[in-house]
Image (spheres, rainbow, N blue to C red):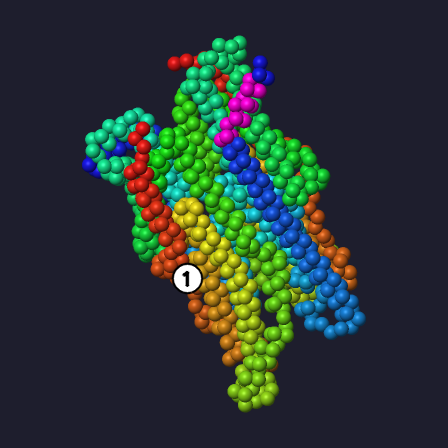
Amino acid sequence: MLQRVLGHEWRALGSDATTWVVIAIFAVAIAYGTWNGSRWVRFQQGALAAAHAEEQERYDRLASQIAEVSAGAAVSPFADPRSPANVGGRLGPRYAALPPAPLAALAIGQSDLLPYYFKVTTDARENIVSATEIENPQRLLVGRFDLAFVLIYLYPLLILAVTYNMISAEKEQGTLALVLAQPVSLATIVLGKVMVRAGLLVGVVVVCAVGALLLTGTSLAAPGAAARLVLWGAAVAAYGTFWFSLAVWMSSLGRTSAATATLLASAWLVLVVLLPSLFNLVVTVAYPVPSRVEMVQATRVASDEANAAGSQLLAAYYEDHPELATGGAEQAMTDFNVIRVAVNDEVEKRVRPVIDRYDGQIRRQQEAIDRLRYISPAVLMQDALNDVAGTGVPRHQRFMAQVSAYHAAWRAYFTPLIFNKTRITDVRATPQFRFEDETAGTVVRRVTVALAGLAVPAVALVWLGLGRLRRYPVAG
Amino acid sequence: MVLRIARKEMTELLRDGRFRVLSAVVLAVSLMSLAAGWKQYADISRQHQAAQAATREQWVNQPKKNPHSAAHYGVYAFKPKSQLAIVDTGIDPYMGVAVWLEAHKQNEFKYRPAQDRTAVQRFGEMTAAEVLQVLLPLFVVLMTFSAFSGEREQGTLRQVLSLGVSRRDLALGKALGTAVALGLVLVPATLVGVAAIALTSTGGYLAGDPTRAVVLAAVYLGYFVLFIAISLAVSAWARSSRLALVLLLTFWFGNALVASRAMADLAGWWHPTPSAVEFQKAMEADLSNQQEVQERIEKRKQELFVQHGVDSVDALPIAFSGVSLQEGEEHGNEVFDRHYGRLFDIYGRQDGLLQLGGFVAPTLAVRSISMALAGTDLAQHLDFIKAAEAYRRGIQRVLNHDIVVNQKKGQTYLAGPELWNQVPDFTYEAPSTAWVLHNVQVPLAILVGWLVLACVGLSRSARTARVE
């Protein structure tokens, strides 16, 4: 019987011209969003390639300069390519880069806002990680037309548009009573209607998005791509299921088509538009992050004081690191570069609590959102899509942690060289950064939690709806 | 007759449960957003004022040192918060707040506040402006889509018209009634907003300029009239209430959510910005062009030789190192002007395209105008960037000139507080309202065009509305 309902629904839906208009608009939006996402990925890859090329070029130049100077060419101490202070600072910085994940084109997420490469030097960490990609702030404000936008905003609207009158229209046309005179339950009919519509919409999403991905040159054979694609499909299905369930439940209330439409549109407005921005408002008021100007000032005060105390700091530093006080420590006390190491160290130590305060507030905001998000499927979907695409906050935090570790390693590499006044002969031996990506398991675990948040209310709504359908006022 | 129709329309709306619920929601949301905006403004502007005072203090309290060391020490400039940002934060969250003004370098503004927020921020900031631009039009649509079509479906339209009521009066009356009912929601919200702004008027910038707030209010008023007119026009034209609703909701969705993104994409596509790494590389290549710097210095040297009638640097009565430092600065300034000029030019073009987006979506026009009047648009941020850079160049000139005059050969020259105090404190004068209005003349014209079009549309569709 279900099969017959499915067949009939398919024919009825297919013969309606508006269905195809809606599908066509949807398909174009999906393809455009995906194309737009891959354009951004290509831009990022281009920037990272340019960074890599710049580094290579600089290192080649540095190597030949070192050879020249070693052969006896004259050079001022400020530009000496063999000086570890110069190489670790101005001359030899390397890039720490966050390459786009295999399916980054699926959601631009936070990747246009959060920096994805840094030039790492022996300078204080905060000066390094404050770099950003160039972007018109106005474009950051409005956001991009990417696939995630289409899926979060438009996809539920279309689901509601094809489902709001699936029962009430039959009732209003008088066909519902006729159909139910056959040996078929209302639940079976609703199930058939939903399955056809869900199959159609999800099919369009998957086919168009995957097609656009392949056409724009995204490789699905990249490691982790297949798993991420499956997760993405699951997210599309789960989000769709939530909205279909909502439509089933609202339809089961037995109101007119117009009333159901108004209710569903209001639900969309509240869940997709209002609640997320309210959450943002609530967490920013509850856990305000002070303007970074306070951090700038704290850093400045700390470095002024540390600079003033320069040589005393160095003495203290030697006490902590006796292994560095080899040989001419006396003379080293007057060395500008050596003092700088100690000063930088001190500044970082003193600014740490200030930065921790910022990080703490941001963490509290995130924790609050992580709890609140279960009220809004749109926020859950955003998290799931960003995670799948690798453009969300968690992957970026992982990158930042690795950048911090790399910065520490960079400094640890140069500090003894500076103290021992070693001349650098092989500049290519400086440490390099390589991003260790999240394992598929981590991503799956995180996305699954979000998807469960979508599935649980969906199941509840269907359950409630089916219960109600049994008492549906078929006539009158 | 118009008034009578308006009263009927208003009474009907006020008695409608949906109207009460929706207006309660709109009012609550706008009050919340105003309160949050006010708190944020108060916090941030206090922090920025304190920081600006502190950076000045550090500058004037520098110990004795060579002027060029002081130039390297530099000062910070912090973007002051505009008072109307309480209503419209504009691009503030996405624009860096601090810039370090040091020797030889025009630095970028750093620390975009949005980077310190969660991803939910990207759903949009709930500011009063957002409520006015996005939620209120929807409210208008939901309240008016059936104004004509509903009466037609109930058969009352025929009765009303048979009384000899002119269709023009009917349309006008309905528009007026809706506007007054909406006004009952909007006026208290506006009053609270004005009170919030008045309460914070501790001399924040834009504080002494009520014109901006007045023009802003007028623009929003025009915007609502526009939506009421469009909504009524569609209601009169559409065959059924359902069709009217679908058309209006589609328009709202495209207007509020799609158009801005599509236009921003288009802007980025037509006028692409370089990546930071490419930008830096090109700029550094120009900066390190030693030949150009040397030529400049040589030219200046010859000029000075002629001027002082000598033929060697040692014979000059001034310190040439100060001259060559300043020439280095001048060379750098040319490079910065060229590169940042090009970048800001691209931003400007992108912005212009977004303004033109008003042709397809009036919300884009209103957004541009609103941000501009609130002092939170791109043009005013760029103006601040330029002011900070001009200040930086001024510092370098003062310090280098001091070296020229006071540094003596073979001596270590140390300057003191007299010199630090010669550098004036950084004060930023916000651009005049006239300048701002000049910037947004295109969206203003577009908005007026929409308004005229919508009114003409309403009068036409009211005149030709089917009775059955």
B374 left or right of A123 in image: left
Name the foreground residue: A58 vs A126: A58
Q: Residue at x 59, y 84 (%)?
A: B313
Start-end of magenta stretch: A5-19
Name the foreground residue: A24 vs A288: A24
Q: Residue at x 42, y 24 (%)?
A: A257
Mark count: 1
Specify whether residue A279 is in view: no
Which residue was labeled with disc 1?
A: B428
Point out residue A326 in the picture as x, y percentages from the top left corner.
75, 61
Q: Name the image quarter holding the N terminus of chain A.
A: top right
**Rendering quarter of residue B244:** top left
Specify whether residue A206 is in view: yes
Name the foreground residue: A308 vs B359: B359
Q: Residue furthest right?
A: A71
Does the segment drawn in magenta span residue A11?
yes
Point out residue A375 in the picture as x, y percentages from the top left corner.
49, 30
